[in-house]
């Protein structure tokens, strides 16, 4: 049995050490905002934060998590930067199909926490690991600049 701090709430889970965080969130805790995309940490749909750092939940196993705070899309809006990013996403109408957007928002929030005034190339470099099948990359970049303003 282990205790995880997710979105400032403690959860006790009895799961194997090699279970990916993604499945703990979705299948054990019913937190389905974090999406399964590729399963090999290439698309970014499953991005969450461990102590503020963007990580891929599909490849982050329970044994890799010590006492880090986990933040998911369900909790990111409670942070100042996350709320700004979510508001900018709506203002700029970033979402089309929406499947990748949870991971995009999580990555964008981590970027702005690390670099509050990113350039276009900073955004492109940081967000490169988050794929969008609808190709809303221009709106994503615009929304990140809006959230940074």
Image (spheres, rainbow, N blue to C red):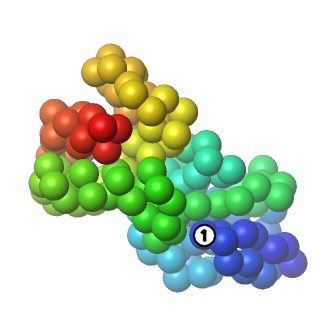
Task: Spot the residue most to the right.
Answer: 1
Task: Spot the residue most to the front.
Answer: 149
Residue at the (58%, 61%) spot, across then down: 71
Q: Is residue 102 above or below residue 148?
A: below
Q: Is residue 16 left or right of residue 7?
A: right
Residue at the (72%, 80%) spot, across then down: 11
Instruction: Give the image location of residue 108, x and y in percent.
Output: 40, 42
State which quadrant residue 70 falls in: bottom right
Q: Is residue 133 above or below residue 13?
A: above
Q: Is residue 25 left or right of residue 124?
A: right
Task: Spot the residue most to the top.
Answer: 121
Residue at the (83%, 55%) spot, across then down: 66
Q: Nearer the viewer, residue 93 or 148?
A: 148
Instruction: Give the image location of residue 143, x and y in percent.
Output: 23, 43
Q: Is residue 95 left or right of residue 38?
A: left
Report if residue 140 is visible in the image: no
Q: Is residue 146 above or below residue 26?
A: above
Instruction: Give the image location of residue 43, x and y in percent.
Output: 39, 42
Q: Nearer the viewer, residue 112 or 127?
A: 112
State which quadrant residue 73 falls in: bottom left
Q: Is residue 92 left or right of residue 81?
A: left
Q: Is residue 112 above or below residue 60?
A: above
Numbered disc total:
1
> For the residue labelled by badge 1, is the local secondary structure a helix, a strand or a loop?
loop
Residue at the (62%, 80%) spot, across then down: 28
Report if residue 110 is visible in the image: yes
Q: Give the residue pinned by disc 1.
A: 7
Q: Residues within 10 Å of mark 1 (few under 14, many from 20)?
A: some
Instruction: Give the image location of residue 137, x and y in percent.
Output: 20, 36
């Amino acid at each position: 049995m282990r205790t995880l701090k997710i979105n400032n709430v403690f959860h006790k889970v009895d799961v194997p050490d090699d279970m990916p965080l993604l499945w703990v969130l979705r299948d054990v805790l019913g937190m389905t905002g974090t999406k399964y995309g590729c399963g090999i940490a290439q698309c970014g749909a499953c991005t969450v934060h461990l102590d503020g750092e963007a990580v891929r939940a599909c490849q982050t196993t329970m044994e890799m998590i010590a006492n880090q705070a986990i933040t998911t899309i369900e909790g990111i809006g409670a942070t100042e930067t996350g709320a700004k990013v979510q508001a900018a996403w709506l203002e700029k109408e970033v979402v089309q199909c929406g499947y990748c957007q949870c991971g995009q928002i999580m990555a964008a929030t981590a970027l702005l926490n690390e670099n509050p005034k990113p350039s276009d190339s900073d955004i492109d470099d940081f967000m490169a690991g988050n794929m969008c099948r609808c190709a809303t990359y221009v709106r994503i970049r615009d929304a990140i600049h809006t959230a940074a303003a």
